[in-house]
Image (cartoon, rainbow, N blue to C red):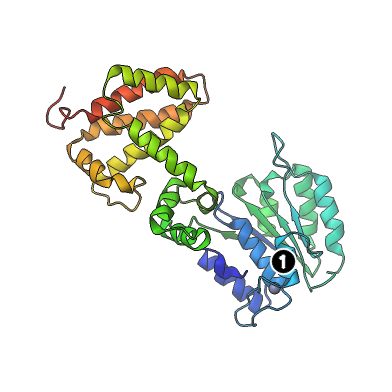
Amino acid sequence: MPFADIIGHDSAKALLRSAIVQNRLAHAYLFHGDDRIGKRLLALRLAQALLCETPSDDQEPEACGACRACRQVEARTHPDFMVIEPDREQANPQIKIELIRDIEHQMIYRPLIGDRKICLIDDADRMTIGAANALLKTLEEPPDHSLFVLVSSRPYALPATIRSRCQALRLTTPAQTQVEAAVILKRELPPADAHFLAVLSDGELGRALECNLEQARNSQKEFSVIFSAKGLHSFSTVLTTAEALAKADRGLEAFDWLLRWLRDVLLLAVGAGSDHVLNIDQRTAMQALAERIDIDELLDLISDLEKLERQAHRNVNLQMALETILLRVRHLLAPQNTADASP
Ligand SMILES: [Zn+2]
């Protein structure tokens, strides 16, 4: 597949295309930017564009995506394409010096098939000092046919000496509309579901593409009932709900959905439009609530919830926290609790 299936990153794609056409590719690139926005995919597509056996034409270098070389790159079996990455099963994933030494030896030899040897180093910031120093030696005198692509979401964790040897390309998070477009295209989902996944994934394309839609929709439904006036109608239902959620170890999940729902109400309350509203199907009810809600109380609740989420890894009594929060939501929802009638 060519660059065309990569959503966003237009300037990076244009830069790489022109470098290929003018035969002015650097020997080392550093693709950096937020997690899961398509950095590694862009590196893979670059490798395909360079190794493809039937590229489209010289003015618009595109890999065919179908030839043997393109498929081998995708499957990571192409003899001139190597991928190094940390062992993510480890508690502290690292790229060790042995891996880099091994690559160093392979990169010296001429490519077997094409005219370039390409090495992709994913999560390059995970290199140990020894590994980084070994790589630095290669980057200082790279073989003519070699191309290194380092990928990192923490470029500052790379030694400055490595960074200065690479041409850096910063990839920015694609706009939400681009994520939606990608979800529609790749998952063949209707726009409403694409919007839901794009907002739910906070604009992270990788997450939006992998998220289990059915499961997310079920949770959304379930929690919208729990957080409704009906679901919180009495003290005893609040206590039962809090206990059930805590016992099922779903306290954090509940906080997350509640936070998203409260942020939705806030967006509507301040007239921000519904582009970033998650629970768009409940818009009418939320709009009615947004119009009569006490914004200060809403903001306090949101900020306390955010604090709770940050502290959740510590020994917070989740059941008690849930009870308190749900009672506050109950108060927020109470029809007599309007902006001009303080309790
Ligand atoms: Zn091809």
- Tell me if residue 269 can be seen: no
Residue 141 found in image quarter: bottom right
For residue 314, side relative to residue 257 (left or right): right
Residue closer to the observer: 95 or 44: 44
Q: Position of residue 298 (x, y in %)?
A: 27, 33
Q: Residue at x 34, y 45 (%)?
A: 279
Looking at the image, residue 267 sits to the left or right of residue 307; the answer is left
| Image quadrant assignment for residue 171 | bottom right
| Residue at x 63% of width, y 44% of height | 157
Ligand 1 located in image quadrant: bottom right
Q: According to the image, label 1 marks what residue?
A: 71
Left or right, 178 with respect to 106, comes to left
Q: Quadrant of the C terminus?
A: top left
Ligand 1 under 8 Å from disc 1 Cβ: yes
Q: Measured from the top left, where is residue 286 in percent x and y?
A: 25, 41
Q: Amino acid at mark 1?
A: Arg
Instruction: Classify 248 as above or below 84.
Output: above
Which residue is more in the foreground, 12 or 185? 185
Q: Secondary structure at mark 1?
A: helix
The location of residue 1, given as percent across then percent down, is 63, 69
Tell me if I can see residue 238 in this picture: yes
Which of the 4 image quarters holds residue 324?
top left
